[in-house]
Image (cartoon, rainbow, N blue to C red):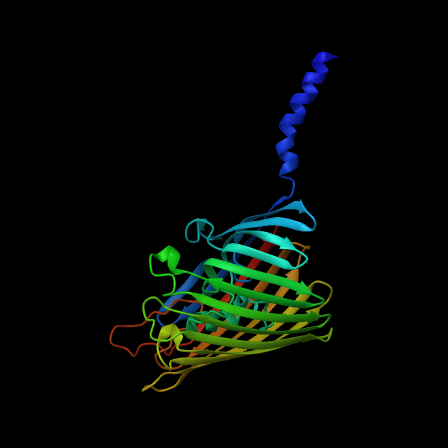
């Protein structure tokens, strides 16, 4: 009997850490495609990563502190599934810790700015979508890409009866060795979602440590409505003083739709255009559209095929395929095309 009691005590000690960690969740996305594309003199044939969602692995957890208060954390690293290499160093996508309660969540770390959630393109911010391509190319921080992940930041997120409020302040200079005020950034966002309707607005301001002549100021408004037979989305966003250069501005608008096909399929069509206004230079435009079909093989696995074309004015080189040109020829202005067939699994 005494040996049994000792064995039970040891088993309890060994299992205690497992129970203490039971609120930690491992999650992730594995997304890869076979792609064929061209941009100028550059051809692409091979495997790409993250056409629908960036491949990642992460850990999130909570601890109940009592009185409705919880400690929360997220550690999330992105990787390129085509090479197996991590993106950046450390937890490149998110790394945060904070407190959550009925008031919302306050967190510290590397986090998403409100502009990361500004998705009204019919493709939910997918990398193959026109809004993602053009906002990243223009250097906007209202984008579903890395420019909307800010280091050394404090955030607030609260959801109340369908309304979600987000706010962020980032003192990026702490980690670069610059003065804290030289490249700080801040932003606010509101999103209202009620059944088939979704409306959102974002405002963000950031400095540039290389050129701090002017603050880059951005705003965006978007809306979407799901009619059942078709889901419609549209957005407009504007950026002033891109990269801190005075009066170098850009305006981007997007329209998109999604049509369900059977019980598991969806057709997606999205179009976007960005116009650049640069002092003492000709205005240029870049237009991009994506046609895609997604098919849910299960709740966690989606097969897809997507085609994107991006049309560039003279001097512009936007697109999912890197630009290549002959020596002595006019730079830029070529169309970029990419066709991808892939699969995404979430866990």
Of residue 324 and residue 13, the one placed in the foreground of this image is 13
Q: Is residue 289 above or below residue 22?
A: below
The answer to whether residue 303 of the structure is visible from this angle is yes
Q: Quadrant of the N terminus?
A: top right
Residues 234 and 176: in front is 176
What percent of the width, then of the height, locates residue 329? Answer: 28, 77
Q: Residue furthest top?
A: 2
In the depicted structure, whether residue 152 falls above or below residue 20: below
As displayed, is residue 223 above or below residue 303?
A: below
Q: Is residue 269 left or right of residue 208?
A: right
Q: Is residue 49 visible?
A: no
Measuring 47% from the left and 69% from the top, which residue is drawn there?
141
Q: Nearer the viewer, residue 108 or 82?
A: 108
Quarter of image, res 267: bottom right
| Residue sitting at x 73%, y 74% | 229
Taking depth in this image into account, of 230 and 46 the one nearest to the observer is: 230
Residue that lies at the very extreme toward the front in this rendered image: 67
Looking at the picture, how far across and down is residue 165, in whole percent? Answer: 61, 67
Total marks placed: 0
Left or right of 99: which side holds 90?
A: left
Q: Classify residue 171 by image quadrant.
A: bottom left
What percent of the width, then of the height, locates residue 91? 47, 50
Q: Position of residue 161 (x, y in %)?
A: 72, 67
Q: Residue at x 48, y 59 (%)?
A: 153
């Amino acid at each position: 009997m005494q040996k049994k009691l000792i064995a039970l005590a040891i088993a309890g000690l060994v299992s205690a850490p497992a129970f203490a960690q039971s609120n930690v969740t491992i999650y992730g996305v594995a997304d890869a495609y076979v792609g064929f594309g061209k941009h100028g003199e550059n051809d692409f044939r091979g495997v790409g990563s993250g056409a629908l969602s960036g491949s990642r692995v992460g850990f999130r957890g909570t601890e109940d502190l009592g009185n409705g208060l919880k400690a929360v954390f997220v550690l999330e690293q992105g990787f390129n599934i085509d090479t197996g290499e991590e993106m950046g160093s450390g937890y490149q996508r998110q790394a945060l810790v904070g407190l959550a309660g009925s008031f919302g969540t306050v967190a510290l770390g590397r986090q998403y700015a409100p502009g990361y959630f500004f998705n009204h393109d019919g493709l939910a911010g997918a990398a193959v979508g026109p809004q993602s391509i053009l906002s990243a190319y223009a250097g906007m921080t209202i984008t579903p890409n890395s420019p909307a992940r800010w280091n050394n930041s404090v955030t607030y997120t609260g959801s109340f009866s369908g309304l979600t409020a987000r706010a962020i302040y980032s003192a990026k200079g702490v980690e670069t060795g610059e003065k804290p005020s030289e490249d700080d950034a801040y932003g606010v966002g509101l999103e209202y979602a009620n059944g088939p309707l979704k409306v959102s607005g974002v405002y963000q301001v950031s400095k540039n440590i290389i050129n701090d002549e002017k603050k880059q100021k951005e705003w965006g408004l978007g809306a979407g409505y799901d009619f059942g037979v078709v889901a419609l989305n549209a957005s407009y966003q504007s950026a002033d003083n891109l990269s801190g250069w005075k009066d170098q501005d850009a305006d981007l608008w997007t329209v998109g739709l999604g049509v369900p096909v059977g019980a598991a399929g969806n057709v997606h069509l999205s179009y976007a255009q960005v116009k650049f206004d640069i002092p003492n230079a000709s205005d240029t435009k870049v237009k991009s559209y994506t046609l895609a079909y997604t098919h849910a093989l299960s709740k966690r696995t989606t097969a897809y095929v997507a085609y994107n074309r991006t049309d560039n004015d003279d001097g512009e080189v936007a697109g999912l395929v890197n630009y290549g040109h002959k020596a002595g020829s006019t730079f830029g202005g070529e169309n970029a095309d990419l066709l991808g067939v892939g699969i995404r699994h979430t866990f």
